[in-house]
């Protein structure tokens, strides 16, 4: 089982790789890995994973009640669409995992990302550890209560998975069309350096990729180019 923490210190991703699939972690390995591909790009190099947990995730940019809502970059990205569907990091990362056959079984975060995850990944288990009232305010469970909530949701997720009743891999139709709306028009200017990218309007750029992993890396590229 591979849990994906929502954030880590800048430039790094903290991965906990669970090699057991019981109702509680039985063995794990901690690794700090460069976020060149973040957690989805780690998947093809792992031969023992059976599912993914998204821990500490947040709602997509523009959510009405989402604590620290954003999609990848608060400074650059206003909106993201995958095959014409508005997406956040849950949909983006979930689709990459799905391309490798890995279902996202659990998400933890506020009530808004939980609802977003259920829209994208039917059957996903959720651990709502805070009730967001806005972008910078939330009523949070105590640390002990949050641990219990996540542990219980993880146990449910694994039990359902073992019965063949859990969430299924999120698989998008290919080729994948990615549309990115930037915060400022000059960011779209720079993003057009990506081969095949086309300008839709002042702030939106669109491109296609043969599969979801390629779409993901191209998305990372246009975000990087926008910061030039």
Image (spheres, grey):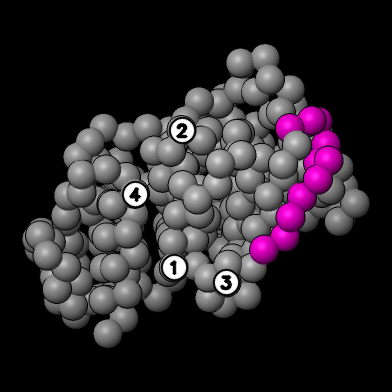
Residue 78 vertical placement versus 211 (above, below): below
**Most foreground residue, 101 or 132:** 101
Query: Nearer the N terminus, badge 3 or badge 2?
Result: 3
Q: Dominant secondary structure of the magenta stretch? A: loop
Q: Quadrant of residue 82?
A: top left
Disc 2 from disc 1: Cα separation: 21 Å
Query: Nearer the N terminus, badge 4 or badge 1?
Result: 1
The residue tagged 3 is: 12
Q: Secondary structure at mark 2?
A: loop
The residue tagged 2 is: 101
Q: Secondary structure at mark 1?
A: loop
Q: Residue at x 18, y 77 (%)?
A: 190
The residue tagged 1 is: 36
Q: Which residues are magenta?
A: 21-31
Q: Quadrant of residue 151?
A: top right
Which image quarter holds the N terminus? top right
Q: Within 10 angstroms of label 1, few (less than 14), some, or many (20 or more) residues?
A: few
Disc 4 from disc 2: Cα separation: 12 Å
The residue tagged 4 is: 213
Disc 3 from disc 1: Cα separation: 9 Å
In the image, farthest residue toward the right: 144
Disc 3 from disc 4: Cα separation: 20 Å
Query: Nearer the N terminus, badge 4 or badge 2?
Result: 2
**Most foreground residue, 38 or 187:** 38
């Amino acid at each position: 089982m591979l849990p994906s923490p929502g954030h880590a210190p800048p430039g790094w991703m903290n991965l906990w790789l669970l090699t057991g699939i019981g109702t509680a972690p039985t063995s794990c390995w901690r690794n700090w890995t460069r976020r060149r591909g973040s957690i989805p790009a780690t998947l093809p190099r792992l031969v023992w994973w059976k599912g993914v947990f998204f821990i500490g995730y947040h709602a997509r940019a523009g959510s009405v009640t989402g604590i620290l809502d954003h999609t990848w970059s608060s400074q650059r990205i206003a909106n993201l669409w995958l095959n014409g569907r508005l997406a956040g990091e849950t949909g983006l990362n979930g689709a990459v995992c799905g391309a490798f056959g890995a279902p996202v079984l659990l998400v933890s975060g506020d009530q808004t990302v939980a609802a977003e995850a259920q829209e994208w990944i039917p059957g996903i288990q959720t651990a709502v550890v805070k009730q967001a009232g806005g972008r910078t305010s939330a009523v949070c469970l105590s640390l002990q209560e949050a641990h219990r909530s996540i542990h219980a949701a993880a146990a449910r997720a694994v039990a359902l998975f073992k019965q063949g009743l859990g969430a299924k891999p999120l698989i998008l139709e290919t080729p994948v069309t990615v549309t990115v709306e930037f915060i400022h028009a000059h960011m779209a200017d720079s993003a057009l350096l990506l081969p095949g990218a086309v300008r839709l309007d002042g702030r939106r750029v669109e491109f296609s990729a043969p599969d979801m992993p390629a779409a993901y890396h191209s998305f990372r590229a246009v975000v990087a180019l926008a910061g030039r």
